Image (cartoon, coloured by chain):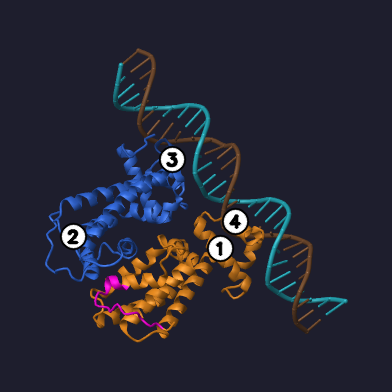
Chain colours: A blue, B orange, C cyan, D brown
Amino acid sequence: MNVVNESPRRKELTRLAAQLFVQEGFDRTTVRMLAQEMGIKSGSLFHHFRDKQEILAAVIEEGTQNALSIARQALEGCEDSAEARLHAMARAHLETLLTDRNAHVVALYEWRRLDAEARDHLSHLRDAYEALWERVIDEALEAGLIRGDRFLVSRFVMGALNWTVRWYDPEGPRKPEDLAHELIAMIAPASSDAPLSTKV
Amino acid sequence: MNVVNESPRRKELTRLAAQLFVQEGFDRTTVRMLAQEMGIKSGSLFHHFRDKQEILAAVIEEGTQNALSIARQALEGCEDSAEARLHAMARAHLETLLTDRNAHVVALYEWRRLDAEARDHLSHLRDAYEALWERVIDEALEAGLIRGDRFLVSRFVMGALNWTVRWYDPEGPRKPEDLAHELIAMIAPASSDAPLSTKV
DNA sequence: AGATCAACCAAGCAAGCGCTAGTGTAAACC
DNA sequence: GGTTTACACTAGCGCTTGCTTGGTTGATCT
């Protein structure tokens, strides 16, 4: 049994599990359903994962790791202005949220199903991600781009962004880029309407 | 068996169910747990509700009905300016979200557990509520209070507000009134900082 | 006094649950 | 050539699940 998602087989199983967890919810997804989706028998599942909980943890870890690394990339590759950085973060957030959708929906909806141990480990990852946000928000506040309480502003922004998984249609005309732009236009009226060069 | 929550007994049972659904999640809450919390045996539960699904539907219906009527009251009792109306809606939303918390958390998290029939019925209620919001947002856009796409703005705002159930601490110093004020300050920079008289 | 009714209970069924034990097998390694 | 390893299988245990059944109670109404 693997502890992290190192083997490609386990990674693929995790991806399939994420899809089922979104469709049915964690509790309603049985190990037999998971096994069938994976083309194996239910007993064989426990060769790859210690128990059902570990599958959930693997799904959420995968999604959060991706979000974190993409956000870091976006920050590295963008202009140094407060607005460009805010835009890059929002866009990166939306892109992971919408391309890696399943894992993030699971993370949002099934977080409480994690046992204490897994929750502890994963909350550190999530904190690291949120720290990136708080820093970018702070910079935007200092630059006078937006106004308000930093605690509240960051939570309002995260709420607006995370909520998108409930209504966003990836087939529609709006792209993550557009959503990020609209959100910032809404909260940062002082911003220029000139196109941003984000270099990524 | 009652179809709506007319009997006070059923109303009380619904309230208790909401609390358990929040604590444990719908799927993990067994009929035996529900019965124990209610001080009866599990069999007796089915005198009040046809099945477990109906309990969930009752919880969500109760919460949504409350939100709808409180929002209507708030709109009736406030000043006629676009800003006052926006503020009244945000405040009413936060107040139901935070005082009637359990039912709303259930509505947000367990919506997908409803069967097709209940979902159809309840989505009409929710649509009526969201229509109130869209109208207030439209007025704010027309008045130049906020800018942007009406579809996106209303969803961003709803996201920011609904997300509060995940981090808001009712024991803390911030009141729903304050949150509403901060949110509007964030998205409506043109607004005055003078206190609003909302008459309610 | 008799009928009605909501509210509850004890007992249990059929189905499904997560998970385990023990085994088979083909490729990889020494 | 023998051992190990990765992956899969079959069979089923022990338990919990939502829900049903058949019956009792005490209050209310006629």
> Dominant secondary structure of the magenta stretch?
loop
Depth order, front residue of A7/A184:
A184
Checking the image for residue B17, the label placed there is: 1
Quarter holding residue B193: bottom left
Q: Name the residue under label 2.
A: A82
Dot 1, crowdedness within 10 Å: few (<14), some or many (≥20)? many
Which kind of residue does numbered mark 4 sit on? Met
What's the amino acid at mark 3?
Answer: Lys
Q: How far apart are marks 4 and 3 (CA)?
A: 33 Å
Q: Is residue B23 shown left or right of residue B80?
A: right
The magenta stretch spans which residues?
B184-198
Residue closer to the observer: A84 or B138: A84
Give neighbour class at mark 2: few <14, some 14-19, many 20+ (Cα, 10 Å): many
* Mark-to-mark CA distance, 2 and 1: 47 Å
Q: Distance between the residues labelled 3 and 2?
A: 52 Å
Query: Spatial distance from mark 3 to mark 1, Cα to Cα?
Result: 37 Å
Q: How many marks?
A: 4
Residue highlighted by disc 3: A41
Asked whether the residues under the numbered discs 2 and 4 touch, taking CB atoms below 8 Å apart as contact, a structural biologist would say no
**Does C4 sit above or below residue A80?**
below
